[in-house]
Amino acid sequence: MIMKHRQLGASGLMLSEITYGNWLTHGESVERAAATACVRAALDAGITTFDTADVYAMGAAETVLGEALRGVRRESVEILTKVCNPTGPGPNDRGLSRKHVMESCHASLRRLGTDYVDLYQAHRFDDRTPLDETLIAFDDLVRQGKVRYLGVSEWTAKQIRAALDIGAELGLRSRLVSNQPQYNMLWRVIEPEVVPLSLAEGLGQIAFQPLAQGVLTGKYQPGQAPPPGSRAAGDGRAPRFIARVLGDELLTRVQGLRPIAADAGLSMAQLAIAWTLHRPGVSTALIGASRPDQVTENAAAAGVSLGDDVLRRVDETLGD
Ligand code: NDP
């Protein structure tokens, strides 16, 4: 299957249907050579969009990604990064103040080894900083050529609405074009409010964790220890993040997806990613992977068409 691209919301920016992100992996649980091999596998599969953040592995994830992309024509990839979560002990090492946004963006560009990022995202909402201060700083980064487009991550509909209104009042030229929420078969909280607002206002969803951190691949079996080498079996901080989705009742329901995937001729990972790509408003499915073969398998979910019967069986199996 040839990788398809989609428009990011109503913007002109095209992203590959699958984006490869490097939280918990690059600079952390995955060795440098394997990280580079994953990026190469992504490029080979037609993935052109890469997501990272200033806070991932305290900057090391950006460094590893930048080095893995060295030699790749800059115009042929889209690099996405984020700011807000704490990157140091100081009071200004976090949040969306003008000071931190400017400093963090410059640090990200240095680590990534690039003059600009394609999408700069507010990783979380910062209720300490006036929204106009953040939006003006973001707009200035676009004017300075350091950032091409602006987005947010895990913002509520009310927060997105406020940002759009304040941006319009201020007459800013750069509008938000995206939101990056957790979105998968098991976590659909954006559907009632965030998606309708985003569709009306032209924001695309960059849906992260389409595999629920690996749970939707079906590799975690109820009542059994996690497979060696998996995120849940690691000895770093990763097992803490995945623990929430490892209950036996949930894992049993997930196993119910196995025959649906088999009937569709897909792996469970591919079914989960294709499901996400079928949801309204989704511009790209933002996956992680710790090995190149996972990247290749997951990338093959791009362009897959799921019939209504498949989508219905998924809903019936997982329930509410
Ligand atoms: P995923 O749901 O894509 O899980 C990825 C993990 O699942 C991999 O690291 C791997 O872990 C396992 N896996 C992937 N593919 C397969 C496969 N085919 N077979 C078996 N196991 C597989 O999400 P992540 O948690 O990795 O997040 C993806 C990206 O989303 C991040 O890199 C980041 O860019 C973004 N993100 C954004 C957040 C935000 O707040 N904006 C928060 C979290 C993530 P293993 O092999 O170790 O078991």
Image (cartoon, helix red, strand yellow):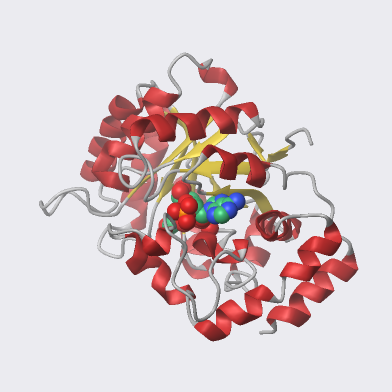
**Residue 292 against residue 89 in the figure, above or below:** above
Name the residue located 58 percent from the left edge and 33 percent from the top edge. Answer: 42
Label total for image: 0
The answer, for residue 135, to whether it is visible in the render is: yes
Name the residue located 33 percent from the left edge and 41 percent from the top edge. Answer: 137
Image check: 125 left or right of 220? left
Which of these two is toward me, 72 or 231?
A: 231
The answer, for residue 145, to whether it is visible in the render is: no
Quarter containing the C terminus: bottom right
Quarter containing the N terminus: top right
Measured from the top left, where is residue 185 in percent x and y?
A: 65, 69
Measured from the top left, where is residue 212 in percent x and y?
A: 54, 64
Image check: 309 left or right of 90? right
Name the residue located 71 percent from the left edge and 76 percent from the top edge. Answer: 256
Name the residue located 37 percent from the left edge and 23 percent from the top edge. Answer: 67
Which of these two is toward me, 255 or 315?
A: 255
Measured from the top left, where is residue 100 in percent x and y?
A: 23, 44
Image check: 77 left or right of 34? right
Image check: 306 left or right of 75? right
Which image quarter: residue 242? bottom left
Measured from the top left, where is residue 159 in percent x and y?
A: 46, 65
Which image quarter: residue 52? top left
**Residue 58 against residue 211 in the figure, above or below:** above
Q: Residue furthest left?
A: 90
